[in-house]
Amino acid sequence: MDVNEKAKQLLEAGTVQAVAGFQTGTRGVRRPVFLRRAEDTGRMVFDPGCRQNLAQYATRTPVKRLGRLALTLRPSGIRALLQLMAERQIQEPDVLALAVDPDGQVTELATAEAMEAHLALTADPIPAEDQALMDRLDRMTRAERWAFWRNELSRCIKCYACRSSCPMCYCGQCTMDCNRPQWVPPPSHGLGNLEYHMVRAMHLAGRCVRCGDCGRACPVGIPIHLLTFHTEAAVQAQFGQRAGASAKLDYALSTFRPDDQETFIR
Amino acid sequence: MANLYQLSSTSLDALFAALRADGRRILAPTDRDGHSELNPVQTPADVARDCMQTTLSAKGAVFPKVEQLLGYRLAPGQVQLADPERRAEPTVLFGIRPCEAAGFQALDAVFNWDTRDAFFNARMANLAVIAMSCTRSDEACFCTSVGGGPGATGGSDILLTPTAGGYLAEVLSDRGRAIQALAPELFSPAPADAHKADLLAQVPVAFDQPALTAKLPALFDSPLWEEQSLRCLGCGACAFVCPTCVCFDIQEEGDKQGGRRLRTWDACGFSQFTLHASGHNPRPTQAARWRQRVYHKFSIYPDRYGQLGCVGCGKCTRACPVDMNLREHLLQASQAQR
Amino acid sequence: MSDTNASNLYLPHLMRIAAITDEAPGVRTFRLEFVDPAAADAFSYHTGQFGLYSAFGEGESTFCIASSPTRKGYIECTFREVGRVTAGLADKEVGDIVGFRGPYGNTFPIEDWQGRNLLFITGGIALPPLRSVICNCLDLREQFGDITIVYGARTVNDLVYKAELQAWQERPDVNLVLTVDPGGEAPGWTGKVGFVPPVVEQLAPSPDHTIALVCGPPIMIKLTMPILARLGFAPSSIFTTLENRMKCGLGKCGRCNTGKSYVCKDGPVYTLEQLGQLPAEY
């Protein structure tokens, strides 16, 4: 069954009150759409152009108000739902994941268990061009890497499209919005840009589900997703934990075990 | 037409050289990994070949994303204020589009309404605009619906229109004439049969803007705004790339020894924009904030400044991560029953 | 035509804190004097106007000018410590320097109110903007008819301008009605006990030749306006003053835009009739 038929079936049966999917927008881009009536489901599409992680709408009030939500998702979107459940931001009954395979066929995943099992069977490597740039960055010296990011981040305009598009950036009051104390300078100058992105990369360490939405959202084309991809990979390497693998989580950076290695502070 | 000339494509080298010899920096669209932005250029060879529009607008030349308004030094019982020098490097914007040039008129309307903003005016006084007419457009463009057009002259000092072998050049202002005077030999009279309109992109009118502006007060409580903004992420991309958006924040950076006050870009789409210290927020929903964007540009600007706060460039639509297509939304609003 | 030397609208006047009064828990009044005597001489304003006050190092905050324009040589502002800037101001001592930009905004048209009765209805920390008008009118007492002030706060301690209230209480040409919320009385309290709206209803002021000025927390305004309407007050003779988040004060930054109005330029003083034309986004 494809996304259109599945969405129609779900809405007709009242299983969900809204389906978050994609439709074709301006200049052929795919954009989010929220179907509430079965007769509108004809306009849904799901193809390689549908890259966005719709899971980020699961925590947004205007969408939550629509009722129980089904979402057409790539593997990164399913990881996002599991991570949001692990962080107690959504509950299993609130959402219905619709995993779409390369043939456009839909698998309904109603429970965290089902989502975890599905992910275990689905390969989802980092896109080749992102991997290539990550490898290139890894081969740089620290000085070269610093220069790369200083140069990229100088173009940042602090529009916060990256933060706004990230499913893990759901905080009602972001650290950036706090002015007592003013942790990070709001203006878009060198320090203001650098500190914002450094803080965000750290706040997403081990939480980034590698959807790449932040990099796609950036209007000036900064590959900002690579920063959070990197910190997530670092947590995986150091703690063996993958973001979005499970709805049960003892977050590596806030969990302490008696056998933790503490050589870095000796 | 009295001020219509032609320039050959090869004469741009000499024009750029003359501008640089006159001590002006030239900002023009340059290519970078599929994005085009305004950057300093030396010669026409540096200019992007095939850029329909840059992502960011030209407003940064007169309204930078960060600007120092004042500085101060502190000592017990003492404050010494420093009024910053109005630094304004003589600048020529080359190759921006007629929609972006029109944006300067909207910026001027705000910065010089009632009181005059010294920082904006210092930069405008040192700016000249050589715009380039559009020979193509895309689905995001709607300049012709808001009083503009692919060959509109508002806000430009010289408007070039590509033609066989070079450009038609309209010299439109004193600043344009001053540029022409730097290299008058480059400007030959336009051929008698030069017809600019034939060279321009076709941009059909998408909606009746005056009718929409008249209708907006009645639409204030419409459920339309919630529906349109369901997918809006509440970021500032649309406002920041917009040639006319001018809402700003004032931020303080300092300590016990001294500090500075900075003006920075801000956006009505941010949830904090109208938030009171008490916690009360007059626009607590994204729907209210999206509505404000539309009303500010299409209802409040005409009322207060006698012109629209939108030039139909479509940059917001292209920059938006979720394709909030302004033209589409406005068309829908103009058709809304309630 | 070069504007490169045009004046910088964002440069504040330097003001020395001449006196500090602790009005109520968390609420304080500053009396400010211009550091530059020439600026002091050149300065004038009208009642209802506001300014942006700087705590250097923290930022600017918007308060009304709470003193009367009839008193020369100083201005006063009253604020509650609620955020970064007001915390910075609350830290200051007599002799410290703060900044002031203004006067901004429109004014209460007291020149149009000759011979009229004036009815002030206010609560808590909303008295400061009206205190400027009250003091202005009291300095020109013979120009106005009856002056009635209804002022309430949560508790006796929360009443601001306690010394002024005492002075107004003692004047035979002012009818001051003070009230505190039920449970807010203290031993020896001789004022009323009750919320401001029912106190106004009980008082039943006449609308004849009367201008009403109402300023208070949203709930007080919401409940008081229908009472005034029932009493026969026309919307064009009820005045209020709005508070919005502001940054520039000049009608440029866009933050205080509400409907077709910029509160910093077209306000903050509005009649109820004008307020009715604004969307409920304030």
Image (tube, helix red, strand yellow):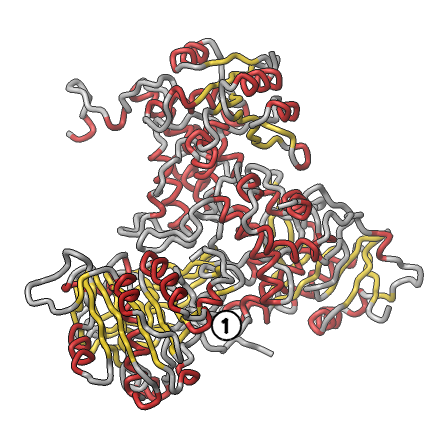
In the rendered image, the vertical position of residue C2 relative to residue A112, given as above or below: below
Quadrant position of residue B96: bottom right
Q: Name the residue at 62% across, 56% down.
A: B298
Q: SS for tag 1? A: helix
Q: Is residue A200 toward the left or the right of residue B104 in the image?
A: left
Residue neighbourhood size for the residue with mark 1, other residues' Cα within 10 Å, grouped as few (<14), some (14–19), many (≥20): many
Q: Chain of mark 1?
A: B
**Residue toward you, C122 or C57:** C122
Percent position of residue C59, x then y: 32, 62
Q: Residue at x 73, y 62 (%)?
A: B15
Q: Residue at the location (48% across, 70% down)?
A: C266
Amino acid under label 1? Ala
Closest to the observer: C282 or C189?
C189
Say which quarter of the image contains residue A251: top left
Q: Can the viewer see residue C223 in this picture? A: yes
Q: Position of residue A181 (x, y in %)?
A: 27, 51
Answer with left or right where residue C67 lies relative to residue B14.
Answer: left
Residue A18: x and y in percent read 52, 26
For label 1, the residue is B118
Residue pushed farthest right? B193
Please give the name of the residue rendered at 38% of the width and 12% of the height, measured from the top-left corner: A113
Which residue reaches farthest bottom?
Answer: C142
